[in-house]
Image (cartoon, rainbow, N blue to C red):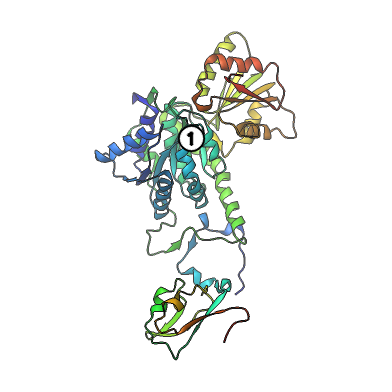
Amino acid sequence: MAVELKSWKELPIGGVIPGGATPELNKTGSWRSKRPIWDAEKCIHCLQCWLHCPDDSFFVKDQKITGIDYDHCKGCGVCAAICPVDAIEMVPERGGGK
Amino acid sequence: MKKVMTGHKAVAEAMRQIEPDVVAVYPITPQSEIAEYYAQYVADGLVRTELVPVESEHSAMSACIGAAAAGARVITATASQGLALMVEVLYIAAGLRLPIVMALANRSLSAPINIHCDHSDAYLARDSGAIQIFAESAQEAYDYMVIAQRLAEDEKVRLPVLVNLDGFTLTHSSQVVETLSDEAVKGFVGEYKAVYPLLDVDNPVTWGAFAMPDYYFELKRAQQAGMEAAPDVFLQVQEEYAKLCGRPYRGFFEAYKLDDAERAIVVMGSTAGTAKVVVDELREKGERVGLLKVWLWRPFPRKEITEALAGAKAVAIMDRAISFGNLGALYLDVVSGFAGREGPVFVNYIYGLGGRDIPVEHIAQVFEGLKRAETGELRYLGLRE
């Protein structure tokens, strides 16, 4: 998403950002060095990964995991560590993947 | 009403009359009595302020920032190492444009540890983004605490303001102070208007967000605009206050017998009182000497000070702190106004470190020394060679 940069005269005082939930506008997943791969077959939808994720990067519908938001996931691996059925595997971003 | 009181009491009285929503403060000599008086006011039910007894000055300023962002009017006070501990977060208060008013009971910085007055603590915060005002007397400390509130909170300014008063010399000495009525002060400072208050849950905002290289520079430039707006607001508020109190506050500095002065001293804080005595004595002998006492140090009123000193032949700029490895900070401030133009000879005097007494004889030595001086000289006043 291309963002037009504002002049210093247009900024709210003190760098305040009016409005909530602004992180959604900012794609920060490019920092990730490891990518969580979710295995829908193994998943028991306990939602522990969704609960622990510090970046709210698990998509949930009808109380079931449906995927991972790679635009915001930083690859911390908390989800893989907490998953009771090893349904999430961390793989290197470059040259990785299954 | 005229009363005899210490600088501490004068500051605490102004605070009581302003009655901020939150005071977060940690005791440190020579500021502690400000905190003690205010805690007593809270305990006695004289004010409805939330007093936050924090565990350090870092926490004091952090609590002030949180309260100010939440939408509260906030005052604190500190000195010396306490300010040093606050500085990390003081920069954040300024960057977030939070109008926190602080009384700074000027005291030297360690090492060696010393509890007495100099301005090294104020100099430490010089580039923090806080506005800095210096008081000569307990009366000025009281008056500028009230003025500072309006200056800090002005919508164009919105910056922390430090009101400097010399530790012990002003904080612990009893002087006659004329206070305004509670109603007059409350009317003058008015209702606090918060900007983007966090407690306005219907209009959520983000405070303290990260800024990458694409925005950090613009945000710091916008912060400078607060400083740029401050001089005009300072003059407006000062004029309004002068009418209210009947005392002749006018301008960024006090020019004492300066108009036709050939030799002049530039100084901040209580030493101006001593210097005035010497100016009067020398004037009686027919010597054309004068004094420029800086009230507003940051933002620095360069243009006005340059004009005020342009007619002098020699000027002594007195710094009550060393800027190690260079001439004093106030010296460089003043001299910068004369870059590329003719001006007086400027000598820098470092004086009064760690509470070293400054008797009238020493000020007389400065005026005498200005008869033979070269620009760029760094002299130490009252030092054993």
User: In the figure, A28 relative to A37: above or below?
Assistant: above
- Pick the front one: B334 or B366: B366
Farthest left residue in view: B44
Query: What residue do we see at 47% from left, 72% from top?
Result: A55
Farthest top residue in view: B285
Farthest bottom residue in view: A41
Q: Where residue B129 sits in the image (x, y, percent)?
A: 54, 45
Q: Quadrant of the C terminus of chain A?
A: bottom right
- Pick the front one: B117 or B279: B117
- What amino acid does circle 1 point to? Gln
- Pick the front one: A93 or B8: A93
Mark 1 = which residue?
B238
User: In the figure, A27 relative to A62: above or below?
Assistant: above
User: In the figure, B238 relative to B378: above or below?
Assistant: below
Query: What residue do we see at 35% from left, 25% from top?
Result: B5
Give the side of residue B129 with respect to residue B69, left or right. right
Q: Where residue B62 sits in the image (x, y, percent)?
A: 42, 50
Q: Quadrant of the N terminus of chain A?
A: bottom right
Say which element carries label 1: helix
Give the side of residue B286 with respect to residue B200, left or right. right
Chain letter for mark 1: B
Residue B258 picture quarter: top right
Q: Where residue A33 sits in the image (x, y, percent)?
A: 57, 74
Res B130 visible? yes
Q: Residues within 10 Å of mark 1 (few under 14, many from 20)?
A: many
